[in-house]
């Protein structure tokens, strides 16, 4: 096991070298060496390789080694690295993960660096910087990007079904009968005999094209699966956000929504959960086996990149409250408390959070950077590719977003809610069973 330095020692090292962590191009004797940086999104890798090259050009004494791993392997390897003392110096962090890391003293607070280097937190889209302040009042990340949710749809299929882009952009939903959202999903579903889901004789057990794709049950967050529906009923994941201590999976509004959503599979409009294991929802769409997929803006490149598929993008449907909704998630870069090179790590994190890097990310047209001016440049880059990303940006502009639920015990909550939600979506348990799961979740906070 490698020896690691404590948070206090790391902070002291930073304090000695903060003068080298600003925007200048000359690194001090402390801010030098190689930094290991991890991220999980392969689509963003080229942008960050360019950022690393630019950073090293300005800071020749610091080299950045980037490692990209798939989502599941990423977190398993990172967690093991914390235990073994060989975690990366800097890594892309997620709101569902950092509270536990911070509680275990595995992250380096950035407050001294932010204050002494005069990092302007007002340049980020509203609320993003605040998300990374823990319950202890310390900052554990600087914002890198943000995301919202929308509907990706196969334009050839909607055209053939007589559904216009305007209709897709004006869908409405309710948990009683599904509104025009369910009607559209049903009409886009086609069985192997060519019968649509809303036609007499439709065979729900032999479906060729599903109106709505299914990735997973969404566990306890449902970011891209159902949260944009539940939020329009007035339901919230927790009693407060961030740092809620009471979850609301026992709320009738939540259970009614999940019952409706899970019922789409029973009607044959959405794949059964057991058939999705090991499958890629995106690739199923690319293969022409689903007409609509709900997903986040970080998948724009993938959905618009399938050969032979003309992809349209629509906003989430308007709900019972008369508004649409989308979870608002924001990633950040964090520093491992045991880094051997805290000064250089801080310098790199500050660079990642600057317009110098985020404008590079924006130019690739893959995600929306956290900085407001860089967000506009990303939208322009998407437009240059012929992609209208308004369905994602308008949620932010209209104020119809809600924050990703941030709370302690995230892994344990998932351990309870993932199988509970799977059971409901697979038809093995009623939505009312989520009341018992909710009791188990709330017991974690007593």
Image (tube, rainbow, N blue to C red):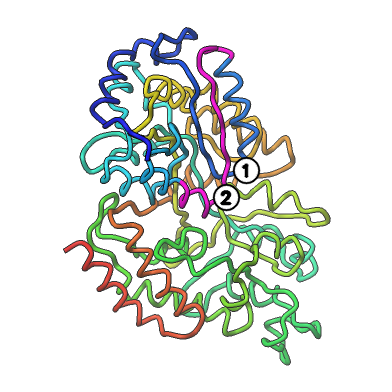
Question: As rendered, which of 33 and 258 lies closer to the eye?
Answer: 33
Q: Residue lying farthest left? A: 446
Q: Measuring from the top left, give residue 55's x and y in whole percent.
A: 55, 19
How far, Cα to Cα, is label 2 from label 1?
Answer: 8 Å
Magenta span includes 31: no
Question: As rendered, which of 309 and 38 lies closer to the eye?
Answer: 38
- The N terminus, quarter of image: top left
Against 308, residue 288 (above or below) is below
Give the labeled residue for mark 2: 70
Question: As rendered, which of 322 and 405 lies closer to the eye?
Answer: 405
In what element is the residue under mark 2? loop
**Quarter residue 377 falls in:** top right
Q: Which residues are magenta?
A: 57-77
Using a 10 Å C-alpha cutoff, classify the residue at mark 2 as few (fewer than 14 neighbours), some (14 to 19) or many (20 or more): few
Give the labeled residue for mark 1: 42
Q: Measuring from the top left, give residue 17's x and y in whole percent.
A: 33, 13
The residue at 68%/60% (across/down) is 153
- The C terminus, quarter of image: bottom left
Q: Residue lying farthest right? A: 308
Q: Are marks 2 and 1 in contact (CB under 8 Å)?
A: yes
């Amino acid at each position: 096991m490698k020896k690691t330095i404590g948070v206090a020692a790391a902070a002291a090292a930073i304090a000695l070298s903060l003068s080298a962590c600003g925007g200048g191009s000359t690194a001090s004797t402390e801010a030098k060496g190689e930094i290991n940086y991890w991220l999980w999104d392969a689509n963003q890798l080229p942008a960050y390789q360019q950022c690393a090259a630019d950073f090293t050009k300005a800071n020749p004494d610091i080299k950045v080694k980037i490692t990209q791993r798939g989502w599941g392997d990423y977190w398993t390897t990172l967690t093991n690295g914390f235990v073994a003392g060989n975690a990366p110096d800097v890594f892309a962090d997620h709101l569902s993960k950092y509270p536990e890391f911070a509680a275990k003293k595995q992250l380096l607070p950035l407050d001294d660096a932010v204050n002494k280097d005069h990092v302007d937190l007002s340049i980020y889209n509203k609320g993003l910087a605040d998300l990374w302040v823990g319950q202890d009042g310390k900052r554990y990340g600087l914002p890198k990007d943000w995301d919202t949710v929308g509907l990706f749809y196969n334009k050839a299929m909607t055209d053939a079904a007589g559904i216009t882009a305007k209709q897709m952009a004006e869908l409405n939903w309710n948990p009683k009968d599904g509104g025009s959202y369910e009607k559209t999903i049903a009409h886009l579903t086609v069985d192997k005999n060519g019968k649509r889901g809303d036609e007499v004789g439709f065979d729900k057990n032999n479906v060729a094209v599903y109106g709505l794709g299914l990735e997973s049950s969404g566990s306890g967050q449902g970011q891209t699966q159902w949260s944009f529906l539940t939020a329009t009923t007035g339901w919230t994941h927790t009693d407060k956000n961030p740092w809620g201590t009471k979850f609301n999976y026992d709320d009738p509004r939540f259970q009614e929504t999940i019952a409706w959503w899970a019922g789409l599979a029973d009607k044959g409009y959405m794949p059964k959960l057991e058939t999705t294991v090991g499958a890629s929802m995106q690739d199923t769409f690319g293969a022409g086996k689903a007409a609509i997929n709900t997903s986040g803006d970080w998948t724009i490149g993938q959905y618009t990149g399938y050969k032979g598929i003309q992809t349209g993008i629509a906003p989430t449907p308007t709900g019972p409250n008369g508004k649409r909704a989308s979870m608002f998630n924001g990633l950040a870069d964090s520093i491992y408390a045991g880094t051997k090179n805290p000064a250089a790590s801080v310098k790199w994190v500050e660079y990642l959070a600057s317009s110098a890097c985020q404008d590079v990310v924006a130019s690739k047209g893959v995600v929306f950077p956290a900085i407001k001016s860089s967000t506009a440049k990303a939208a322009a880059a998407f437009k240059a590719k012929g992609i209208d990303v308004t369905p994602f940006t308008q949620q932010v502009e209209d104020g119809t977003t809600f924050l990703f639920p941030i709370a302690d015990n995230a892994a344990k909550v998932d351990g309870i809610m993932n199988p509970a939600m799977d059971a409901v979506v697979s038809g093995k348990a009623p939505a009312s069973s989520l009341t018992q799961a909710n009791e188990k979740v709330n017991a974690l906070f007593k």
